[in-house]
Each structure stands twice: as structure tokens, then as C-alpha cells.
């Protein structure tokens, strides 16, 4: 291995460490606790080293969001692959989405609430974000209905899931009714 390759590998390893540490800190204490000073202390590198990877917290949030989008897409695809029939797939998709949001609130915030400097719903949207939407679209396009663009239906269903996730987490909706809400969403919006 050349010196150049070793340095690139070490750099990539440091970057993964920064993202993992930011994510861990955000999940434990919230995004307000994630500062470059705290991250530098936790990873035992100087702040200039941290800034050589990310220009600031915004880019770190974006990196966590991209990682989270990949994980969310995998979780949704795994859930729908194990389901039999359109209704079961849509229900599995909704449950996987809501479970991800509940299990990883800081990652969910990085994806959908905070400014990570990422483009959404544009040509220059990063691939992990496009793939997470594609995971929704793959399942929901089969139930969009006649004369309804699958992308539009997917956006509407996704917006409903996002509303359920954020309102439940904020204590605006009682969590014990999540399964019933999911059922209603599938029955009424997807008309299954």
C-alpha cells in the first residue's frame, strides 16, 4: 500500500469516526450538544483536524442524514420484501418508517428537520436521499391508483408518515394509537 493510499484510508476512517461520534452524541443528548469542540474532545483530535473534514456542524448533520437515508432505505426494503401482497407491503413500509423515526430520532431530525446543506427533490439531490425516496416509491407505486402519478402519491403518503412520526414524538399524538393510525393511513389513503 502506498503512502497516499494509507493517508486516504486514515482520512476516511477519521471521517467515519466524526460522523459516528456526532450521531451518538446527538442521539444521547440532542443536536444542541453536538459542537465541534465537543466532537474534537471525544474523538481526541484537534478542531483543525475536524475542520479539515467538515466545514462545520451543518456538513456533519448532512453526513449523518446521508448515512441515515441509506439505513432507512435498507430497513424499508427489508420490511416490504418480507411482506406478501400490496396491503401487507404498504403496512410493513409504514411500520418500518415509523420505527426508524422512533429508534433514531437524531438521525431522523438530520434527515428531515435540520439544515444539513442537502438538496431535496432536485436534480442535485444526493443518491442516498434519492434511494430512500425510491424505497418508498417502489412499494407505493403499485397502490397509487388509476390516474394518479406514483411520485405524487408517494410524496403524500410520505408526508402523512412524517406527520405521524413528528407529532407522536412531540407528544401531540398518544403513542398507544400508532398502530391504529397506521392502519387508517393504509386503509384510507392507500385504499387497501
Image (cartoon, helix red, strand yellow):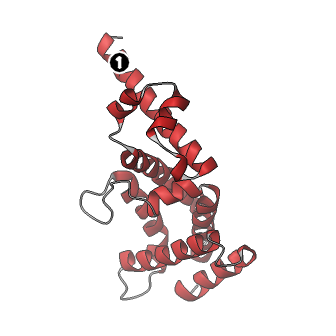
140 lies left or right of 80 = left
Label 1 secondary element: helix
Task: Identify the residue at image location x=43%, y=49%.
Answer: 61
Which of 102/90 is in front?
A: 102
Residue extending farthest top:
2
Q: Position of residue 21 (x, y in %)?
A: 54, 37
116 lies left or right of 97 = left
160 lies left or right of 5 = right
Report the residue marked by disc 1. Answer: 7
Q: Quadrant of the C terminus?
A: bottom right
Task: Identify the residue at image location x=42%, y=64%.
Answer: 133
Q: Position of residue 85 (x, y in %)?
A: 60, 73
Q: Position of residue 56 (x, y in %)?
A: 36, 43
Residue extending farthest left:
123
Which of 44/63 is in front?
A: 44
Task: Identify the residue at image location x=49%, y=51%.
Answer: 68
Amino acid at each position: 500500500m502506498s503512502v497516499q493510499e494509507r493517508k486516504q484510508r486514515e482520512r476516511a476512517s477519521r471521517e467515519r469516526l466524526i460522523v459516528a461520534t456526532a450521531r451518538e452524541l446527538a442521539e444521547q443528548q440532542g443536536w444542541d450538544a453536538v459542537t465541534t469542540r465537543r466532537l474534537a474532545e471525544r474523538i481526541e483530535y484537534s478542531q483543525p483536524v475536524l475542520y479539515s473534514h467538515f466545514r462545520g456542524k451543518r456538513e456533519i448533520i448532512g453526513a449523518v442524514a446521508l448515512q441515515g437515508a441509506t439505513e432507512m432505505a435498507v430497513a424499508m426494503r427489508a420490511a416490504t420484501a418480507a411482506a406478501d401482497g400490496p396491503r401487507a407491503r404498504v403496512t410493513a413500509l409504514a411500520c418500518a418508517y415509523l420505527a426508524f423515526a422512533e429508534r433514531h430520532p437524531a438521525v431522523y431530525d438530520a434527515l428531515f428537520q435540520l439544515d444539513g446543506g442537502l438538496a431535496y427533490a432536485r436534480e442535485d439531490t444526493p443518491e442516498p436521499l434519492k434511494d430512500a425516496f425510491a424505497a418508498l416509491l417502489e412499494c407505493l407505486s403499485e397502490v397509487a391508483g388509476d390516474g394518479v402519478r406514483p411520485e405524487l402519491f408517494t410524496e403524500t403518503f410520505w408526508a402523512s408518515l412524517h406527520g405521524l412520526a413528528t407529532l407522536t414524538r412531540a407528544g401531540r399524538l398518544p403513542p398507544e394509537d400508532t398502530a391504529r393510525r397506521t392502519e387508517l393511513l393504509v386503509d384510507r389513503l392507500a385504499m387497501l
